[in-house]
Image (cartoon, rainbow, N blue to C red):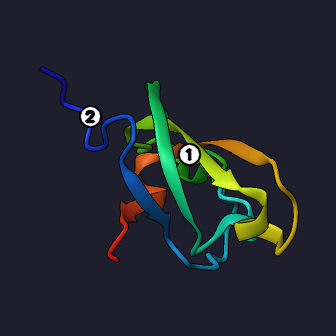
């Protein structure tokens, strides 16, 4: 049994936001659909840590695969990004 929110193969969508501070969620991947490949362990949330705060939460990081066509409108390959759990939400069909 695992405490991970997303299992390998889960369809997710990245949050679509433009925070006024650093984020590790690339702009080109915001609001895009992908598939979780695997959980990669827990790490301090870089967004909070980069602000010089010491109250950063520790979150699960997931390897998420995106079709290049979904990110840039073209390409037959895939892109894998390591994304914090708070960047992800369930993909609603």
Label disc, if present, on residue 37 of the rendered structure: none
Q: Measuring 12% from the left and 20% from the top, which residue is drawn there?
A: 1
Q: Measuring 49% from the left and 49% from the top, which residue is drawn there?
A: 35
Q: Where does residue 28 sit, x and y in percent of width and height?
A: 76, 69
Which residue extends farthest front?
76
Q: Where does residue 18 sit, x and y in percent of width and height?
A: 64, 79
**Which quarter of the picture shows residue 51?**
bottom right
Q: How many tags in the picture?
A: 2
Q: Is residue 71 left or right of residue 75?
A: left
Seen in the picture, residue 67 relative to 16 is either above or below; the reply is: above
Q: Mark 2 points at which residue?
A: 4
Label disc, if present, on residue 83 of the rendered structure: 1
Q: Where does residue 74 sit, x and y in percent of width and height?
A: 87, 69
Q: Is mark 2 on a helix, strand or loop?
A: loop
Q: Measuring 39% from the left and 41% from the top, which residue is drawn there?
A: 9
Seen in the picture, residue 84 relative to 2 is either above or below; the reply is: below
Q: Where does residue 2 sit, x and y in percent of width and height?
A: 18, 24
Q: Is residue 24 among the parts visible in the rendering?
A: no
Nearer to the camera, 35 or 14? 35
Seen in the picture, residue 42 relative to 65 is either above or below; the reply is: above
Pointer 1: residues within 10 angstroms few (<14), some, or many (20+)?
many
Give the CA separation, mark 1 to mark 2: 13 Å
Q: Measuring 37% from the left and 68% from the top, which residue is drawn there?
A: 91
Pointer 2: residues within 10 angstroms few (<14), some, or many (20+)?
some
Q: Is residue 84 left or right of residue 6?
A: right
């Amino acid at each position: 049994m695992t405490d991970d929110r997303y299992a390998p193969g889960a369809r997710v969508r990245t949050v679509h936001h433009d925070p006024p501070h650093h984020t590790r969620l690339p702009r080109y991947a915001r609001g895009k659909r992908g598939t979780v490949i695997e959980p990669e362990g827990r790490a301090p949330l870089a967004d909070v840590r980069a602000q010089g705060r010491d109250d950063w939460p520790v979150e699960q990081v997931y390897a998420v695969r995106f079709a290049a066509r979904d990110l840039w409108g073209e390409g037959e390959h895939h892109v894998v990004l390591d994304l914090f759990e708070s960047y992800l939400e369930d993909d609603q069909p």
